[in-house]
Image: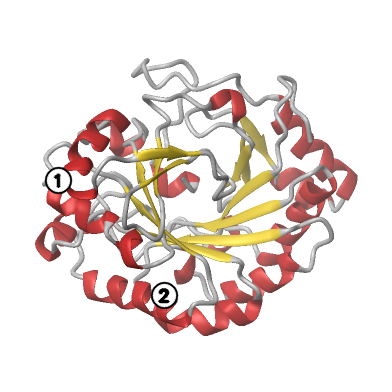
Amino acid sequence: MIDRLGRNIDYLRVSVTDRCDLRCIYCMPEEGVPPKCHDEILRFADIERICRQAARLGIRKIKITGGEPLVRRRVEELIRTLKAIPGIEQVTMTTNGVLLADKLQTLIDAGLDAVTVSLDTLDRSRFSRITRRDELANVERSIRAVMEDGRLPLKINCVPMTEQDPADLAAVAAFAKEHPVHVRFIEMMPIGLGKDCGFLSEEQLIERLEPFTGILVPVQEQLGNGPAHYYRADGYTGRIGFISAVSHKFCSGCNRIRLTADGFLKSCLQFETGEDLRPALASGSEELLAEAIEKAIRKKPAGHHFDERDAAGAEHRIMSQIGG
């Protein structure tokens, strides 16, 4: 679907839960989030209905997110269902990797097209400080399992912070050296708890990485569904990417909308703009559901205002509650 500014909206991020087995300091409080009751979270049948109408409107790619999507029971069944929807070309997932190794085969069998693992550090003590859990070994085991299996394309997402040792960042980037893995560095976004975390711009990150990687040379390859742009480094099999929403605003080409676990369709990450789809779901009318999705897309803002700390209409929920 083409929005009012001429952008082709073809990518839907679907949060299947706001729960997580980690407590990353920029995403979720240490005590977690107030648990929603079962009836507040969309059932898989509701997600399927939404995705069917979204596909009719031009959505072609779906990303399964959370919270942590693998804590939702039988998520592989949802993946299999979404893959069968006419018009859906790709279903992928972003995960923290804690449970991925144990669920890898069922996800592949369900038809998952690719997986992204979030990993901010390879230092065990720092990992525990960031996530408030000692799970680095399980995340590394999952990454190795995906690479050794070889059937599922893998990306790694890293959110650096100002005090982080450049060698630590380079160690994450090194996954792209020997393997066809793309490592992306994501600028900290001033949303929710991220407002209080240190920020490194793309230029600062490149300056810190190049003593380890060598000169990073821009490439024009399209290596994903989102806004990342990529660089090559001599001797690296994969690419180094950057998702730089703050320092390199890419809103003019934004192609995505986000469905929260409780049924709100967000048209922009920063703002509360969007539509609650639950009334349309409850009506039983597929026509009303499609109209609600169209309405949310029509409301999509021209762009974020991350430079305004208290921008009018800014999202008040934390990242785990809106699906990232």
Residue 176 coordinates in the image, percent (x, y): 35, 59
* Gap between marks 1 and 2 measured at Cα: 25 Å
User: Callout 1: 10 Å neighbours few (<14), some, many (20+)?
Assistant: some
Q: Is label 1 in contact with label 2 (beta carbons under 8 Å)?
A: no
Residue 137 coordinates in the image, percent (x, y): 23, 75
Q: In this rendering, is residue 188 above or below 237?
A: above
Residue carrying label 1: 166
Q: Is residue 90 visible?
A: yes
User: In the displayed structure, does residue 207 sit left or right of residue 73?
Assistant: left
Q: Residue at x 13, y 51 (%)?
A: 167
Q: Nearer the viewer, residue 26 or 188?
A: 188
User: In the displayed structure, does residue 233 sit left or right of residue 225?
Assistant: left
Q: Nearer the viewer, residue 170 or 96?
A: 170
Q: In this rendering, is residue 280 above or below 20?
A: above
Badge 2 amino acid: Met
Residue carrying label 2: 147
Q: Quadrant of residue 209?
A: top left
**Which mark is first along the chain, 2 or 1?**
2
Residue 301 coordinates in the image, percent (x, y): 60, 21
Q: Residue at x 79, y 50 (%)?
A: 55
